[in-house]
Amino acid sequence: MSKQAKKKTRRYSEHVGESRLMPYFFVGAATIYLILFTSIPLLRGFWFSFTDSLLLAPTEGKFVGFENYRRYLTDQSFYSSLWTTIVYTFVVVVGAVSLGVISAIAINEKLPGRAIFRSMLTVPWAVPGVSVVLIYNWIYNYDSGVANQAVRALGMGQKGWLIDPSLGMFSVAFASIWKVFPFIMLVVLAALQSVPEELREASKVDGADRFSAFKTVVIPHLMPTIRVASLLMTIWSIRRFEIIYLLTGGGPSGATNTIVINVYKQAFESSELGRAAALGILGLLLSLSVTIVYFAVDRKNAKRDSL
């Protein structure tokens, strides 16, 4: 073999070797990140949940076994915050998914100015959570807020949107829906635009009207996307903190005191790091339960569709 051929072979081998190593490089970087910033803190928190550690002296806590978990599982306030979390999550997910799907269908139509509407509807998703709180504090202001101006115009009395226990959950959930529905809208819009045109045309040839074609062709195509988006929205809603805390602080009268808000109060107001860690683990188990149920249902649907 000539020297030139040997050089080409060596360069090719080096190139192939680099190509094979590149996936490991990217996976390795992601793995290191997960270990340093997710796995280690999670394991550390799991250990704290079995101690009576305090926030200002985390290493001086004593091992107490399952005592922190036992106290929560026998405490009515835990079940109250769990129920509040479930209600908040349900309202936000149903509201955001419904509004997101309707918005996606609307802006997918060939209407004049739809690019402008699309840009306007994505603004809430780009707005930071703290800014959302400022906006809705102004909207819900008792004396000069837009919400009370609207109910006064309808001949009703002013409402304490953030101080009335019967309205606190609705008010916080509405602000959260406004913040997150553009995410659903964008992913559903992408799914809508990926529906093969041949399927639409075939349904028209079969004599289906527009509504029937949408029901039999488009909706089945959208459902996997909607299910995944709903799962993500559920997990995010269980973990939602800033909007709830900055609007109501878990009030009024515990009406918005979700598990995440309770974790914050235990850790930073009561300085009970061990109890806060145990409650955080219980919240994590709630998210994992939702994920397990989703995959079980998804697997069942996949088996049914394959028959």
Image (cartoon, rainbow, N blue to C red):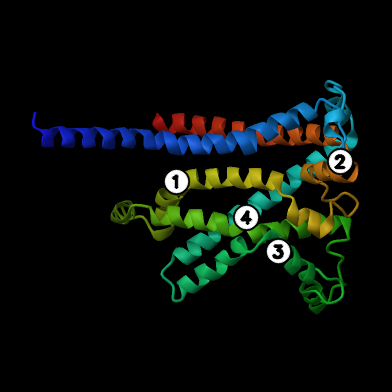
Question: Is disc 3 placed on a helix, strand or loop?
Answer: helix
Inspect the image, locate mark 3, and give the three-letter code of the amino acid beneath it.
Answer: Val
- Which of the 4 image quadrants contains residue 181? bottom right
Tell me the distance, in whole angstroms, between the alpha carbons under discs 1 and 4. Answer: 20 Å
Inspect the image, locate mark 4, and give the three-letter code of the amino acid beneath it.
Answer: Ala
Local packing at callout 1 (Cα closer than 10 Å; few below 14, some 14-19, many 20+) is few
In the image: residue 1, left or right of residue 56 = left
Q: Which residue is drawn at 70% across and 51% down?
A: 91
Task: Residue 42: give x, y in percent of width and height.
Answer: 69, 33
Question: Is disc 1 placed on a helix, strand or loop?
Answer: helix
Q: From the image, tell me which residue sits under label 4.
A: 96
Tell me the distance, in whole angstroms, between the alpha carbons under discs 3 and 4. Answer: 15 Å
Q: Which residue lies furthest to the front in this view?
A: 3
Q: Disc 3, disc 4: CB below 8 Å? A: no
User: Image quadrant for the C terminus?
Assistant: top left
Tell me which label, 2 or 3, sits earlier in the chain: 3
Tell me which label, 1 or 4, sits earlier in the chain: 4
- Which one is in front, 162 or 195? 162
- Which one is in front, 16 or 212? 16
The answer to whether residue 142 is above or below residue 26 is: below
Q: Residue at x 44, y 52 (%)?
A: 191
Tell me the distance, in whole angstroms, between the alpha carbons under discs 2 and 4. Answer: 30 Å
Local packing at callout 4 (Cα closer than 10 Å; few below 14, some 14-19, many 20+) is many
Q: From the image, tell me which residue sits under label 1.
A: 220
- Nearest to the eye among marks 1 and 3: give it: 3
Inspect the image, locate mark 2, and give the three-letter code of the amino acid beneath it.
Answer: Gln
Tell me the distance, in whole angstroms, between the alpha carbons under discs 2 and 1. Answer: 45 Å
- Nearest to the eye among marks 1 and 4: give it: 4
Question: Is disc 4 placed on a helix, strand or loop?
Answer: helix
Q: What label sits on residue 266 in the rendered view?
A: 2
The answer to whether residue 72 is above or below residue 85 is: above
Q: What label sits on residue 132 in the rendered view?
A: 3
